Amino acid sequence: MLVICGNAIDNSRTQLLCNKLAQLNADTNLIDLKDKCLPIVGLPLDEQHRAEIDTLKAELKKHNEVIIVTPEFHGAISGALKNFLDYFSKEDFYDKKVFMLGTAGGNKGGINALNNLRLIMRSLGALVISDQIVFDPEDIDKTTGQINEMLLNRTLDVINKFTMNNLVNN
């Protein structure tokens, strides 16, 4: 399973949730966009960026299940996540199962970002599952790293159904 952290801000609620999900089992890998510095799609690429994109595509190819976690910025996914996804095509995501999670800066934000992401992932040929969960600010404590246990357990239940092989013990 692959977890994509769609926020480039260090120590964000999105990053805390992604790190927790990346620890689910030994077969879970994490792509954290804070560690990537991809130029805006359409700008010239140097060899280092070409190699990084090839590595990211190879990593995605190894996984049939992908979890994407995005914050909501101004009613949509983060610019970092959109730019990242723009480097991929239908060939890269076709028939991959995608589970989406949102993190909100305010109460009940996140839904617009998930709706936005759903459209993007469908256009990339992904099999987007219907379950989607939003973590509000009070659900993830940035100081302690604590995550709302009820929402986390709901997330783990969806992941178990999503992977169909009970990779997660909750």
Image (cartoon, grey):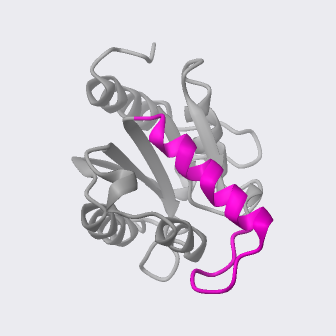
Residue found 59% across the figure and 46% down from its top: 140
Note whether 34 is above or below 164 in the view shown. Answer: below
Residue found 25% across the figure and 45% down from its top: 95
**Location of residue 68 in the rendering, given as x and y in whole percent from the top left corner:** 46, 51
Residue found 54% across the figure and 51% down from its top: 57
Is the C terminus in the top left, top right, bottom left or bottom right quadrant? top left
Q: Is residue 55 magenta?
A: yes
Report the number of discs: 0
**Location of residue 163 in the rendering, given as x and y in whole percent from the top left corner:** 32, 26
In the orientation shown, which residue stands out farthest toward the left? 130
Front residue of 103/22: it is 22
Front residue of 102/119: it is 119
**Location of residue 50 in the rendering, given as x and y in whole percent from the top left corner:** 68, 64
Q: Looking at the rendering, which quadrant does residue 113 occupy?
A: bottom left
**In this picture, residue 77 sits left or right of residue 158:** right
In the orientation shown, which residue stands out farthest toward the front? 47
**In this picture, residue 92 sits left or right of residue 23:** left
**In this picture, residue 93 sits left or right of residue 135:** left
Front residue of 114/105: it is 114
Note whether 26 is above or below 156 in the view shown. Answer: above
Q: Is residue 137 magenta?
A: no
Front residue of 7/84: it is 84
**Location of residue 58 in the rendering, given as x and y in whole percent from the top left corner:** 55, 44
Chain part drawn in magenta:
37-63
Residue found 25% across the figure and 58% down from its top: 125
